């Protein structure tokens, strides 16, 4: 059931939270299992990065809207593709909100970050050499903060808060959206290229099946 209304919207009771987690986990599993390019090593990297991103969000929870999730889901889509990127966004939302608190807002956050990951997969943020196009990525991650804030604000609407209050809610949330955008810019400039390297798996063949100089290079 839905419990009391919290800061971001109605708080979910235990049964509703369990249903939401099962729904999100099921969506992520379907996305991953329908990605034919997914391998065990790449799945291991994905889950490790999900844990790291969720931990980063929890650790920075006291900084309003300054968190690593938006940059990481955008780059997950750019490096891993749409399916894995969206699954990454959903899993990070579910895992971090298990600590920070589940509510109706979890759905809106998951959808917002999933859309960021999808955008990252379609907007050519990585060049032919596998390097991050930093200027384009920084501009995009700043621009997406505003619609993300507007989308998640919708979670507040309900029986006690009608559509008439939406303009005031969007206006009052604007400083937080600006903080979100600025935080995204700083993180992208500071760590964007490194995040891309972490997310880009270079699979090397078995050295025992490679001969000559290539084998020597693989064993180093």
Image (cartoon, grey):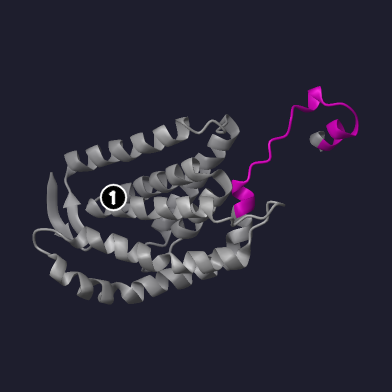
Which range is magenta?
A: 196-217
| Residue at the (9%, 62%) spot, across then down | 160
Residue at mark 1 = 107
Side of 105 where 89 appears, left or right: right
Looking at the picture, tell me which residue is in the foreground, 44 or 122. 122
Residue 204 lies, with reference to residue 141, above or below; the image says above
Looking at the picture, tell me which residue is in the foreground, 150 or 218. 150
Considering every residue shown, the one lying at the far left of the view is 159
Where residue 162 sits, quadrant-wise, is bottom left
The percent coordinates of residue 208 (x first, y second) are: 80, 23
Q: Quadrant of the C terminus?
A: top right
Number of numbered tags placed on the structure image? 1
Where residue 156 sits, quadrant-wise, is bottom left
Q: Is residue 203 magenta?
A: yes
Task: Give SS at disc 1.
Answer: helix
Side of 171 where 75 appears, left or right: right
Q: Is residue 62 visible?
A: no
């Amino acid at each position: 059931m839905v419990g009391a209304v919290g800061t971001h919207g109605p708080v979910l009771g235990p049964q509703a939270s369990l249903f939401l987690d099962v729904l999100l986990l099921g969506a992520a599993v379907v996305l991953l299992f329908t990605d034919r390019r997914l391998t065990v090593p790449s799945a291991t990297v994905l889950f490790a990065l999900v844990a790291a991103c969720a931990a980063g969000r929890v650790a920075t929870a006291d900084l309003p809207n300054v968190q690593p999730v938006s940059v990481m889901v955008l780059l997950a889509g750019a490096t891993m593709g749409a399916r894995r990127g969206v699954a990454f966004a959903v899993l990070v939302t579910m895992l971090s909100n298990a600590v920070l608190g589940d509510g109706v807002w979890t759905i809106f956050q998951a959808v917002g970050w999933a859309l960021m990951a999808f955008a990252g997969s379609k907007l050519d943020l990585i060049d032919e050499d596998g390097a991050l196009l930093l200027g384009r990525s920084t501009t995009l991650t700043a621009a997406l903060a505003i619609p993300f804030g507007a989308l998640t604000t919708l979670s507040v609407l309900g029986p006690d808060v009608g559509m008439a209050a939406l303009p005031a809610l969007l206006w009052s949330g604007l400083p937080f959206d600006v903080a979100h955008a600025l935080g995204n810019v700083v993180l992208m400039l500071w760590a964007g290229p490194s995040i891309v390297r972490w997310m880009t798996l270079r699979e090397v063949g078995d050295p025992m099946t490679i001969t000559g100089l290539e084998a020597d290079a693989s064993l180093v």
